[in-house]
Structures are given as C-alpha cells and as structure tokens.
C-alpha cells in the first residue's frame, strides 16, 4: 500500500532529505501535503506570522470557508489542552516577543484563529488523502502544533523527529508521550566520563564564574534606538526618553558579567525591567552549605518547555510543587538561564518565587557545575541540567517529557512523590552506561536539524540527506523501530497524568 505522506518540514536542510526520501521510496511513498517554506505546498511561517506569503499552491487561507473538517479535534478530550498549547506557541510571535509579530492581541482572537486554522488545515489533510504524518521537529510553532493534534485525532500514523545530544544522531517517536521511554536491547555500553561535562554549542560563550563587568557597545545602543524607531517612532523625537533608556541599559550592562549579553538579540523595553530585577541578586551572598535542590530555569520561549513541559511550561508551578515535597530546612537554589530575556519573566513570576520561603535566587556567575555537585538533587522541567546531573551521579527530578527520563537516576514527578524518593536514589554508573548504550543503538545516524548540521562541517549534506532518507523510509514502512516506544505500567500513566493535566 502506498504511504500518502503529510509532512511538516520548515528548514531548508530538510528539503534534500525529503527529496531523497521520495526518490528512494519510488511508488511506496507519495508526498501529498507539505507545510514548509516557499517551495512547499503552503508556507508555515505565513500561518504563525499571519502574513500573505504563499507556497507553491498558494496560501492556506485563500478561498477559505468553514468545512467542519476539524470536528474530531474539537470534540476530543484533549481539545482544551490543544487550544491552550496553540495559544502558548503563538504567543511567542506576539508584538512584545518578536520583531515580525502577528496582529493578534486578545485571548478570544487566539481562540478564533485556532478554530479557523485547524478547520482549514484539516480540510487539506482530508482532501490530500494522507495516511501518515511526518514532523521533522517536535511541534512548537503553533501551526505545527495544530497539525500534530489533527493528525493524531484524525487517525494518521505519526512520526516525530528531533536531533539528539548524542553526536550525529537523531531520534524518532510515534507520539510525544513516548519521548524518553524505550525498551532495552542488547548493545555495547555507552562510555560516560563522570568528570566531563557535555559541550553544548548553543551555550558557547557562557561563563561559570564572576568576571569583569560588561560595557554597553555602540551596536547595542544602536539596536535599542532602532527598536524604538520601529515600535514607537515618536520616542526617537523625545531625547529625554531615549537617553533614559540608554542610561538604564548601560547600568544593566555594567552590572552583569561581560559574557552575559542582555542586548544581543531582539530588544523590548520590557527587558530592561527584567534585567534590573536580576541586578538585585548579582551581589547577593551565595551559601552552598546545607541541603538544597538546584533548579536551573530553562530558556523561554522554546520547545523544551512550551511543547514538552505540559502544565510545567509554567516553571514557577514546577518550583511550587517541588517546594511542597521538601522537608523543613531544605532550600531550592534557583538560577536563571544565561540566555534568557524578559519573556515569561514579569514581576509576578518573581513574586511567586519570593512567596516560597525555601527559594533563593542566585547570581548569574555561580557555577552550574558546582551547584550540581553539591546539591541533593537537580530538578528541572526537561532541561539538559538533569542529564548532566545523572552523568555525575546526582539524581534528577523532571517535570516534563525529558528525553532522558527513562534512564537510571531520573525520577519523573508524580503526585505523592516524596523528597527521599529522589534524594535517596542510588544507582550503579555501569547501569547508566548500559542503558545509554541501548538508547544509542536505537537512535538513527544523521542530522535532521539545521543548527546541529551547521556545527558539523565535516558532514556532506548530500550524504546526510541520503542516509537520513533511508532510515525515514524504514520508519514509515515499519521496518525500523522508533527510538522511543510505549512502555506500559502505572508509573508511566501517573507521570503523563501529572505532566499533561495536573
């Protein structure tokens, strides 16, 4: 039977893989619907930014009408969660978060657009006759979130990919709930040096110690002026207002370590208040004596929280639930992500943390490695800090769908969990290496993510496309097992209930 494939693939680096897949498959796979760039049937970013830019078949919203095609999603038990997830993913394109924002300003408009977009996309899926859906990345941009929810409720066989932190490997799963769970297979152990920390290219330049203060550069000042010109040109004609912004920015830059660049990317005036709050903690005392849990905040907006965190995309909620299981005298040391801007870090977020007696907010220069080494355990939603912890023999408590949650040393949060369930956890390092060996053997060779491909210059793009396509064909036809696969049992059911519904 011919596989009729609906594919969501945005990156230019995905196009050669998709082309190689259809060439290798011949009549076995027919690409019937593609959401991606301008060379795809419909352009994905036009849907998240709500612009008119079209794909090969025009714009998804042209000649639009209500077809009732998405009723399976609207009537499903997951309707409310799917809609709120869509809103959260679309909100990252709000005017205060993105230089190319969509025009939505109110909650009801998000709800309306959810229904319109879901119906229009469902109609295309039905008309295409798609039997399978392939996602080159975990859905987290709004339109791909709806596409995933539709594919699941409409009965398509889904396959989701994402790059792993194992060099040159990507992973696969049929559903996002499978992420992190996998059956053991006979495989060589994966060697893990406990004294070595993974080198993450996206954290390049981040310091782990107190250094000299930064300085506001001319380019950063110009970026602030340009942001005002773009958002409110009248402010540029008010020298006092503009000078006040630059003075605040200079104070912030000089109050943080030189490696902490608060104005490197998109700038919004809201960010000044956020960084001014961080300055209140920069010279605070750091006491690592006694029992504490280390909670490193994750960067937002990002897939790792927005798509994989479930209800714990609200990281303050995870800290609140963590506080509820701690004995008297055990602290929660919270450190901000060194790449974070003001998104989801308003005054009330910090007020929620201040209301928790056990919480202490740390300066940016405190070493995350030292914090991990001296903690009773590390807690996070899905962050790499949990993986780094178990490598060092420290337990990790996860609140979301972390890719490593099926490894020794990890405890997924569930109601009824106790402090000692995590802090008292012990495991053999050889067991971790064995389990990681089994995981490594279930992964697939190649790069499906453009960011990881860019930092692997020795990789030939054409060879990579051919290699990835062959494995995708096996996955779609069922000859190759997904990396992550269902594991039944009450433990998993409790975790999913906690993460997704609370």
Image: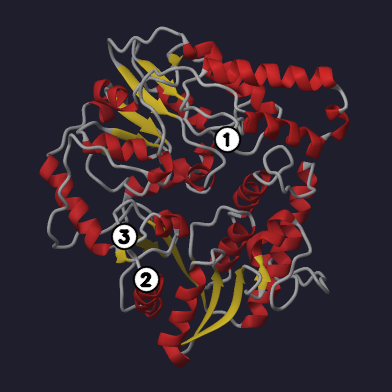
Looking at the image, residue 63 lies above or below residue 295: below
* Residue placed most toward the observer, 198 or 306: 198
Q: Mark 3 highlights which residue?
A: 168
Residue drawn at 37 percent across, 30 percent down: 379
Q: Quadrant of the N terminus?
A: bottom left
Tag 3 secondary structure: loop
Examine the image and state in which quarter residue 484 appears.
Answer: bottom left
Looking at the image, residue 127 lies above or below residue 72: below
N-term mark: 2 or 3: 3
- Residue 83 is left or right of residue 157, and the answer is right
How many marks do you count on the picture? 3
Residue drawn at 59 percent across, 60 percent down: 144
Q: Mark 2 highlights which residue?
A: 464
- Residue 156 is left or right of residue 475, and the answer is right
Q: Horizontal and vertical percent for residue 206? A: 41, 32
Residue drawn at 26 percent across, 32 percent down: 395
């Amino acid at each position: 039977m011919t596989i009729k494939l609906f594919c969501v693939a945005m990156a230019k680096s995905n196009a050669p893989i998709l082309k190689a897949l259809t060439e290798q498959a011949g009549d076995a796979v027919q690409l019937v619907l593609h959401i991606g760039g301008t060379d795809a049937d419909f352009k994905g970013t036009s849907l998240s930014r709500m612009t008119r830019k079209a794909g090969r078949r025009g714009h998804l919203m042209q000649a639009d009408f209500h077809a009732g095609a998405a009723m399976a999603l609207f009537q499903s038990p997951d309707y409310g969660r799917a809609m709120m997830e869509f809103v959260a993913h679309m909100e990252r394109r709000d005017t205060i978060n993105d230089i190319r924002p969509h025009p939505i300003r109110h909650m009801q408009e998000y709800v309306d657009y959810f229904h319109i977009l879901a119906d229009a996309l469902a109609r295309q899926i039905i008309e295409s006759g798609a039997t399978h859906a392939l996602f080159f990345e975990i859905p987290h941009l709004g339109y791909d979130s709806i596409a995933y929810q539709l594919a699941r409720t409409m009965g398509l066989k889904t396959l989701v990919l994402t790059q792993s932190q194992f060099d040159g490997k990507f992973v696969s799963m049929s559903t996002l709930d499978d992420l992190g769970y996998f059956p053991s297979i006979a495989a060589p152990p994966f060697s893990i040096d406990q004294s070595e920390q993974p080198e993450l290219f996206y954290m390049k330049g981040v310091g782990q110690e107190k250094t000299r203060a930064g300085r506001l550069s001319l380019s950063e000042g110009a970026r602030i002026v340009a942001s005002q010109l773009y958002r409110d040109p009248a402010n540029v004609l008010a020298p006092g207002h503009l000078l006040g912004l630059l003075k605040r920015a200079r104070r912030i830059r000089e109050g943080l370590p030189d490696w902490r660049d608060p104005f490197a990317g998109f700038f919004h005036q809201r960010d000044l208040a956020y960084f001014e709050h961080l300055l209140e903690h920069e010279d605070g005392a750091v006491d690592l004596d006694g029992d504490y849990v280390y909670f490193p905040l994750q960067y937002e907006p990002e897939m790792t929280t927005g798509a994989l965190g479930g209800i714990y995309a609200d990281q303050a909620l995870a800290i609140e639930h963590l506080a509820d299981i701690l004995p008297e005298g055990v602290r929660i040391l919270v450190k901000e992500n060194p790449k974070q801007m003001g998104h989801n870090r308003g005054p009330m977020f910090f007020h929620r943390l201040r209301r928790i007696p056990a919480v202490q907010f740390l300066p940016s220069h405190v070493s995350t490695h030292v914090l991990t080494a001296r903690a009773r355990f590390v807690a996070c939603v899905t962050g790499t800090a949990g993986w780094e912890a178990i490598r060092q023999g420290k337990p990790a408590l996860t609140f979301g769908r972390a890719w490593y949650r099926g490894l020794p040393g990890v405890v997924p949060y569930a109601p009824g969990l106790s402090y000692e369930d995590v802090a008292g956890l012990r495991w053999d390092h050889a067991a971790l290496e064995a389990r990681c060996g089994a995981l490594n053997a279930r992964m697939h060779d190649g790069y499906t993510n453009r960011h990881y491909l860019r930092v692997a210059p020795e990789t030939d793009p054409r060879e990579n496309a051919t290699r990835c396509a062959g494995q995708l064909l096996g996955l779609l036809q069922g000859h190759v097992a997904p990396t992550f696969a269902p594991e039944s049992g009450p433990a998993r059911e409790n975790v999913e209930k906690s993460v997704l519904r609370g």
